[in-house]
Image: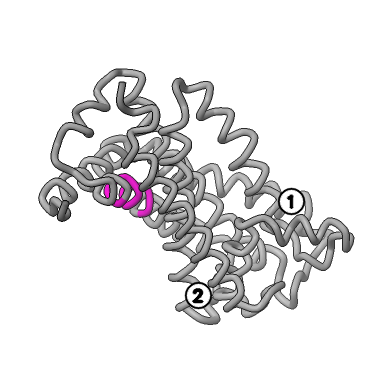
Amino acid sequence: MDSNWLGLWTLTAREVRRFTKVYTQTILAPAITTLLFLAIFAVAVGRAVEMVAGVPFLEFLAPGLIIMAMMQNAFANTSSSLVIAKVQGNIVDTLMPPLTAHDLTFGFAMGGVIRGLVVGLVVAGAMLPFVTIHIHDPLPVLYHAVMASLMLSLLGVAGGIWSDKFDHIAAVTNFVVTPLSFLSGTFYTLDRLPEGVQVFAHANPFFYLIDGFRYGFIGHSDVAPLTSAAVVAAVNLALWLLCHRLFATGYKLKA
């Protein structure tokens, strides 16, 4: 079946309107939360550690906080949309229109990607009065910003389809998204870890997102930028195929 372009546009627009209607919770709140993180680290760590990877500590920290906010909100957008629809019983309104599995995957994912990018821009703007942000190479910044939002959007789609209630998606957030985010190198460079632990860091796909994104700002990375780009693309392809399969089979969506 060919793509239903009108239906695809409508689904994407619906997902975008979901978070713009409550922008104080979905856009402004993440900016305030990130500024609190920044303030805590500036007071608790910034005075003890002045330079990391050849740049001031806060300048090193800022890209990681920006992309982490993007990732968390992209995940929240898609996962909450699907879980709410399933709990309220109106998921049928999304499944009944002539939309292909590709259309459904793309529409939900794009809603999360757009929210992630908007949150990233707002967070970066909120940081500017407090942190000097230099862009070493805009291409890795743009690439990893889009791919990070897409990865977490797709993860949110898969988690939302799998979840039967809010407790289930909360478990995914608490035991998958949050640990991988905090153990991804947001607050440190890889060489600060013991060699044995570095192996686990390399197995974390979030590490490549943050490392590649930070490289675009400060010109330092723990792995080759092209390696990060390739790993991120491979993970996103696998997640896309998984979400497409879940929609195509109606897993936990169709009675």
- Residue 71 image offset from top left, x and y in percent: 50, 50
Residue located 13% across and 51% down the image: 4
Residue located 65% across and 47% down the image: 180
Q: In front: mark 1 or mark 2? A: 2
Label 1: element kind: helix
Q: Residues within 10 Å of mark 2 (few under 14, many from 20)?
A: many
| Horizontal side, residue 215 vs residue 239: left or right | right
Instruction: Give the residue number, with chain letter if any, for mark 1.
Output: 43
Looking at the image, tell me whether mark 1 or mark 2 is earlier in sequence order: 1
Q: Is there any visible trace of residue 132 in the rendered image?
A: no
Instruction: Give the residue number, with chain letter if any, for mark 2.
Output: 140
* Residue interval drawn in magenta: 106-113
Residue located 67% across and 57% down the image: 186
**Residue 112 in magenta stretch:** yes
Label 2: element kind: helix
* Residue 190 versus residue 139 in the image, above or below: above
| Horizontal side, residue 241 vs residue 215: left or right | left
